[in-house]
Image (tube, rainbow, N blue to C red):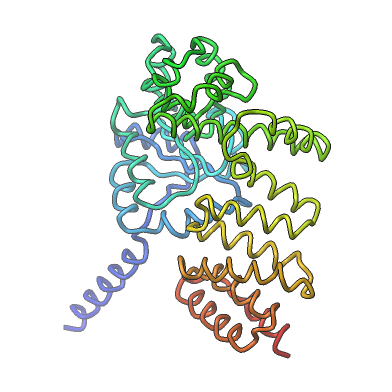
Amino acid sequence: MNRLYAALFIMLLSGSTFAQSDGILFNHSDWNSLLQEAGKENKLIFLDAYAEWCGPCKWMAANVFTDPEVGAYMNEHFINAKIDMEKGEGPDLQEKYMVKAYPTYIFVNSKGELVHRFCGSMPKEKFLAKVRNALTEDSTYTFITEKFEKSPKDDPREVLQYVKTLDESCIPTDEALQTVYASIDASPENLVRWSDLIRDYPPVYGSELFAVMLKEQSTLDEENGEKIQTGISQALRKYMFGKLREGKDAYLEAREHLATEPVQDLDKILALSDMYYYKALSDWNNFAKSVDILIEGGRGEDAGFLNSVAWTLYESVDAENKEVLEKGLAWAAKAVELSKEYSILDTYAALLYKTGHTEKAHGMALEAIRTAKKSGEDYSSTEKLMEEYEN
């Protein structure tokens, strides 16, 4: 009887162990051994190509790779590997598979041949959807890119699929886009035909096709007009960020030049680059004005954005500048309405303290700590915040 209870106890312990390991089970063998294992099991290798310092990599490891649904799917269909691209075999694999950003997810067969790839942090649903493409031949990175290289570049849907595939794999798209746009006649008809590509990956400002976009936008139907307007906005933001990197004079000169172009809602288009321009100058009044323009333009429902700009003011603005700090406090309050994540609650508490709302700040700080305890996050910074303002 004692042996029976002992056996049951061991089984319960084993069940508990497995329950705690419901996420992805990574095989930490060397690369050649992983390839051999993939051959034996007739599976692809899933490689999480990461770097130790990479924040999004850590987020994926903590929030997605530990999920039972993700673990069940990945453990059934793949040999899973996790390799730091800056250590051991990592640098050779990084070069072989052209890892340009972290995290990048690589899927290879037992011969080490690339089958599929994508990159970035994302919710589990999106991650699994992209993973499943690795097991669907005509949805893999290799199939899409090889098909594009062999076919004419005149089908807008195929071109957009190809460019998106590169982009989602953290592979530069500029060369492919330049080739495609160089082959397109700059005509109103082609604006409509290529409107989806133009919306997502527009031609550069100053090109012939871009000039037609500015000229003909108002003549298009509502749906295509909106797509072209989005393309114009994206192209100009990219252009102005380039000028921002060149320095203050280049940025202001380019902005003055754009004022002579027939660009609708120029201030809204340039608000993001303006925000960074004024941040670099520590011009917090104009920084706040740029943020308000972005909020009016739709970023007011983006909790992460609101939290980021509010924290910028907390860190950078003196307590005497009440008017600007109150702006940040309003942004932080809106962020809390949208999301109760620890970092967002912490930012709101910090700004409440800095603007003198100590009692409310204390309550918000405690709520942030409770939230952090539930999610397993480090809340020591909130405790230091409370000590700083309450002692």
* Image location (x, y in percent) of residue 175: 57, 19
* 224 relative to 361, above or below: above
Q: Quadrant of residue 188?
A: top left
Q: Nearer the viewer, residue 212 or 54?
A: 212
Give me the residue at 40% from left, 10% from top.
150
* Image location (x, y in percent) of residue 127: 38, 46
Q: In the displayed orientation, state which residue is furthest to the right.
A: 249
* 14 relative to 170, above or below: below
Give me the residue at 21% from left, 80% from top.
5
* Image location (x, y in percent) of residue 4: 18, 78
In the picture, measured across the screen, residue 220 lies left or right of residue 290, that is left
Q: In the displayed orientation, state which residue is furthest to the left.
A: 1
Q: Nearer the viewer, residue 211 or 177?
A: 211
Q: Quadrant of residue 330?
A: bottom right
Give me the residue at 55% from left, 68% from top.
344
* Image location (x, y in percent) of residue 244: 74, 39
Task: Count up the numbered dots.
Answer: 0
Q: Is residue 205 visible?
A: yes
In the picture, measured across the screen, residue 11 lies left or right of residue 122, that is left
The image quadrant where one finds the N terminus is: bottom left
* 130 relative to 171, above or below: below
The image quadrant where one finds the C terminus is: bottom right
Q: Is residue 384 visible?
A: no
